[in-house]
Image (spheres, rainbow, N blue to C red):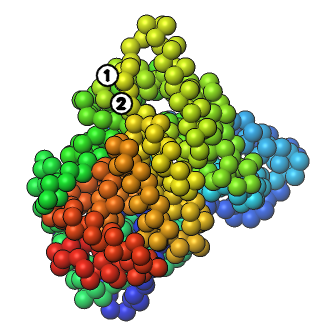
């Protein structure tokens, strides 16, 4: 690696953003020059020239469509997944949509202004509209429209549109925002990591950074102003820390940390084929969480024992129609066949809140996280639910499929969902279509009400899985996507621990499996405590599996149980953490 030295006169800048993709990177910065292109000045055109402006506008739209079509073709050639290509399709759809171009033509005609100014006016109106939308996911979609308008503007003004493919040497890309198309082009690229001013955890760019394993920090607000091309920067994608122009001694610290991180990653591979068993013989199943097909290879390489949470809603995002039964069956079959007999838990559609599909306009709900979300949406839309259940059932003929319902809040909801499943089974039977007659059915425990009545729920399901992300959101009343209340996110909050304990005990008593598939499962220290409460399955992203396995293989289940008993009486998360830090053997302390 090039020995990176920061010039003495440059000021060190320490920034904290949202770490959306883990890993440490030290490298030279390359600032992509392409903020929103604004027309140089207001410019009036003579009535006789408006047609020429309209023609220029149409040509710029056409050029933009052609560029995107070329990118799409390249993505196909590079065998990038459908989810990525679908995002380009969504951009193409916005470009082809007459509204954007017609509104701009109207402004050219009415106000007799140049095409750039008219487009700028339309974009401004659209952005004003988007900022008034409460829904975070939809608000983030405004960046899609901005990207597209920006591309058209660049083509209108003839300015250069820098792309990540323009990089001549490996670099950390800094940009106001990156389009999903940019991120997709990073797969083969020279991009060591990226930093953006805007963005949130749910943006497509963040999702894709994780899936292609490029360290990334977003939401830095003004990194494009604080970093210059050629600066040295350090990214820690796990903590969201960014240091621009670090001193030699800080760079050394991070270089060592990076080496340690990578060496640790390599040593972990040793655990790939070993069972996840504690020193006193308690077996914990380690499963993978799956969103998009590209993650399958990494999950297999890290030795997951199956899929504990298949977030099927990713099949429904970025499109205007619903996936058909055949399309879903194809997607599920791929996963089921990959896991060849190992379990695949298909969670039924969890849309609403921050995951919006075009046909479900959660922006109209005042409080979408508590609105028509997940199982509520499926029960309200029986045809959509039925299509998915039929596809999932048919996939069960090809391997070990289980079906899980999200966000169950009470027994009636559970019974209705199970009723819909029975109906789908009856249809398939009468059509002579194969499925696993003894398919297991589970409920997610992620609403406090269901955690409280876990003893009743366990009597009517084959397994349960605790969704700690939402369980924390709903029990501690902290919006998952609101950074202002993020400090209240405390997995060791006594209320959370009590609920987990209650749920695990109920399941153990009923003799059914109890898993955790929220982010808590992928953190070794939390995983250890979850195991101590009697959880027998943990489901997480590919890159957490071996860390958790290493930890649990060196731990005693009996000891974990004793610790859980001890911490059950504590009043605060801080007390719990302090106690565990002191009580855990030296070996594991690094994991805290
Ligand atoms: C959870 O809530 O913990 C969970 C796993 O579901 P999701 O993150 O998809 O809402
Ligand atoms: Mg959830």
Distance of mark 1 from mark 2, alpha carbons? 8 Å
Give SS at disc 2: strand
Measuring 51% from the left and 26% from the top, which residue is drawn there?
421
Residue 171 visible (yes or no): no
Q: Which residue is mark 2?
A: 401
Outermost bottom residue: 9
Q: Quadrant of residue 257?
A: bottom left
Of 519 and 334, nearer the camera is 519
Whether residues under marks 1 and 2 lie with C-beta atoms below 8 angstroms apart, the answer is yes
Q: How many residues crowd around disc 2 within 10 Å: few (fewer than 14), some, or many (20 or more)?
A: many
Residue 457: which disc? none
- Image coordinates of residue 481 in percent, x first then y, are 56, 62
Whether residue 559 sits left or right of residue 213 in the image: it is left
Q: Residue at x 43, y 23 (%)?
A: 393
Residue 280 located left or right of residue 521: left
Is label 1's Cβ within 8 Å of ligand 1?
A: no
* Element under disc 1: helix
Q: Position of residue 434 (x, y in %)?
A: 38, 14
Q: Residue at x 35, y 42 (%)?
A: 512
Depth check, front residue: 94 or 576:
576
Position of residue 220 in the picture relative to residue 103 (left or right): left
Instruction: Work out which quarter of the rendered image holds the N terminus and state it.
Output: bottom left
Per the image, the residue denoted by label 1 is 398
Q: Residue at x 35, y 49 (%)?
A: 508
Quadrant position of residue 252? bottom left
For label 1, the crowd category at 10 Å Cα-Cα, with few meaning under 14, some 14 to 19 and many 20 or more, is some
């Amino acid at each position: 690696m090039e020995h990176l030295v920061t010039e003495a006169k440059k000021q060190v800048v320490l920034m904290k953003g949202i770490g959306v993709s883990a890993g440490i990177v030290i490298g030279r910065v390359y600032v992509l020059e392409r903020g929103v292109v604004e027309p140089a000045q207001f410019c009036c055109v003579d009535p006789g020239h408006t047609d020429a402006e309209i023609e220029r506008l149409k040509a710029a739209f056409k050029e933009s469509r052609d560029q995107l079509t070329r990118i799409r073709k390249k993505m196909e050639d590079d065998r990038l997944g459908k989810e990525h290509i679908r995002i380009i399709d969504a951009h193409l759809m916005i470009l082809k949509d007459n509204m954007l171009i017609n509104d701009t033509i109207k402004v050219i005609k009415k106000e007799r202004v140049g095409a750039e100014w008219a487009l700028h006016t339309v974009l401004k109106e659209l952005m004003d509209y988007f900022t008034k939308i409460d829904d975070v996911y939809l608000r983030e979609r405004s960046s899609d429209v901005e990207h597209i308008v920006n591309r058209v503007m660049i083509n209108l003004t003839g300015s250069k549109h820098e792309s990540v493919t323009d990089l001549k040497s490996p670099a950390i890309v800094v940009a106001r925002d990156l389009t999903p198309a940019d991120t997709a082009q990073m797969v083969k690229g020279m991009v060591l990591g990226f930093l953006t001013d805007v963005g949130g955890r749910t943006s497509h760019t963040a999702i894709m950074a994780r899936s292609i394993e490029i360290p990334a920090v977003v939401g830095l607000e003004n990194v494009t102003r604080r970093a210059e091309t050629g600066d040295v920067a350090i990214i820690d994608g796990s903590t969201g820390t960014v240091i621009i122009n670090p001193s030699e001694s800080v760079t050394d610290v991070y270089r060592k940390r990076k080496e340690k991180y990578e060496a640790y990653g390599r040593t972990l591979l040793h655990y790939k084929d070993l069972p996840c068993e504690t020193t006193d013989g308690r077996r914990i199943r380690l499963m993978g969480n799956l969103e998009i097909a590209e993650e399958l290879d990494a999950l297999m390489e890290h030795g997951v024992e199956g899929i504990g949470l298949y977030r099927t809603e990713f099949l429904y995002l970025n499109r205007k129609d619903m996936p058909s039964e055949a399309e879903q069956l194809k997607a599920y079959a791929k996963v089921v066949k990959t896991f060849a007999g190992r379990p695949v838990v298909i969670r039924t559609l969890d849309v609403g809140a921050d995951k919006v599909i075009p046909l479900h306009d959660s922006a109209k709900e005042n409080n979408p996280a508590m609105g028509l979300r997940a199982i509520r949406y499926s029960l309200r839309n029986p045809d959509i639910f039925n299509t998915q259940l039929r596809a999932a059932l048919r996939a069960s003929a090809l391997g070990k499929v289980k079906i899980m319902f999200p966000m169950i809040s009470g027994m009636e909801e559970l019974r209705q969902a199970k009723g819909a499943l029975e109906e789908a089974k009856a249809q398939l039977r009468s059509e002579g279509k194969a499925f696993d007659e003894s398919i297991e059915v589970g409920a997610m425990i992620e609403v406090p009400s269901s955690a409280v009545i876990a003893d009743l729920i366990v009597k009517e399901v084959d397994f349960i899985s605790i969704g700690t992300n939402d369980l924390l959101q709903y029990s501690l009343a902290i919006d998952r996507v609101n950074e202002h209340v993020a400090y209240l996110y405390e997995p060791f909050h006594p209320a959370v621990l009590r609920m987990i304990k209650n749920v695990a005990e109920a399941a153990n008593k009923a003799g059914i499996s109890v898993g955790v598939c929220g982010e808590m499962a992928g953190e070794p220290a939390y995983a250890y405590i979850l195991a101590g409460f009697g959880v027998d399955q943990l489901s997480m992203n590919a890159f957490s599996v071996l860390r958790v396995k290493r930890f649990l293989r060196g731990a005693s289940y009996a000891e974990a149980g004793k610790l859980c008993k001890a911490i059950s009486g504590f009043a605060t998360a801080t007390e719990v953490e302090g106690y565990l830090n002191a009580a855990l053997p030296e070996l594991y302390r690094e994991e805290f």
